Amino acid sequence: MGNPPSPGMGSSRRRSQRIFAQVPIVIRGEGNPALPLQEETQTLVINAHGALVLLATKVTQGQKLIVKHKRTQEEQECRVVYMGPAEGGKTQVGIEFAVANPGFWHVSFPPTDWTPHHEDAKARPH
């Protein structure tokens, strides 16, 4: 068996570095027509192309959503690209922005070739 897909991505090729960060967000969209989706949650992982979040509301692969950054009130259209394991009644969901928006999260992402050995990495005292 192969490796499972990377969270938030449909392929194993990473387009931007991931950062583990808990950013408060609101996810909106049309789930069940009788019960529109709006859920407050937070990110688990972010990147320039989207995020991995935990949702209690059921969503489907390819479903269009709106993510709202609670601190800045900015909104970004996205779609569900990954459905992961459930944790405590919530499911890990990878969302991808309709258009890459690295500024949405208001963090600086490291370059794609960054490693702890990269020249820009700070040396730790031994």
Image (cartoon, grey):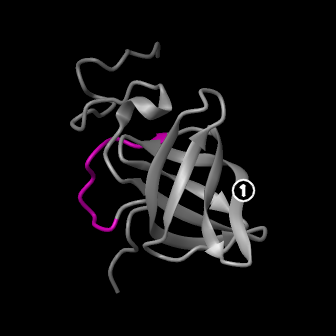
Determine the residue positioned at 47% across, 75% down: 61
Where residue 114 sits, quadrant-wise, is: top left
For label 1, count other residues whose C-alpha is less than 10 Å away and answer few (under 14), some (14-19) or many (20+).
some
Residue 107 horizontal side relative to residue 3, left or right: right
Q: Amino acid at mark 1?
A: Glu
Q: Is residue 62 above or below residue 7?
A: below
Residue 9 in the image, given as x and y percentages of width and height: 36, 61
Residue 80 in the image, given as x and y percentages of width and height: 47, 66
Determine the residue positioned at 48% across, 71% down: 63
Determine the residue positioned at 59% across, 27% down: 72
Residue 20 horizontal side relative to residue 56, left or right: left
Q: Nearer the viewer, residue 95 or 29?
A: 29
| Numbered marks: total | 1
* Residue ranking furthest to the bottom: 1
Q: Which residue is mark 1?
A: 39
Residue 25 in the image, given as x and y percentages of width and height: 64, 43
Determine the residue positioned at 55% across, 64% down: 93
Query: Can residue 91 be found in the magenta stretch?
Result: no
Q: Is residue 107 above or below residue 66?
A: above
- The part of the chain drawn in magenta is 10-19
Residue 101 in the image, given as x and y percentages of width and height: 36, 38
Label 1 element class: strand
Residue 23 horizontal side relative to residue 96, left or right: right
Q: Nearer the viewer, residue 47 or 4?
A: 47
Q: Main secondary structure of the magenta part?
A: loop
* Residue ranking furthest to the front: 34
Where residue 8 sits, quadrant-wise, is: bottom left
Q: Nearer the viewer, residue 7 or 122?
A: 7
Query: Can residue 11 be found in the magenta stretch?
Result: yes
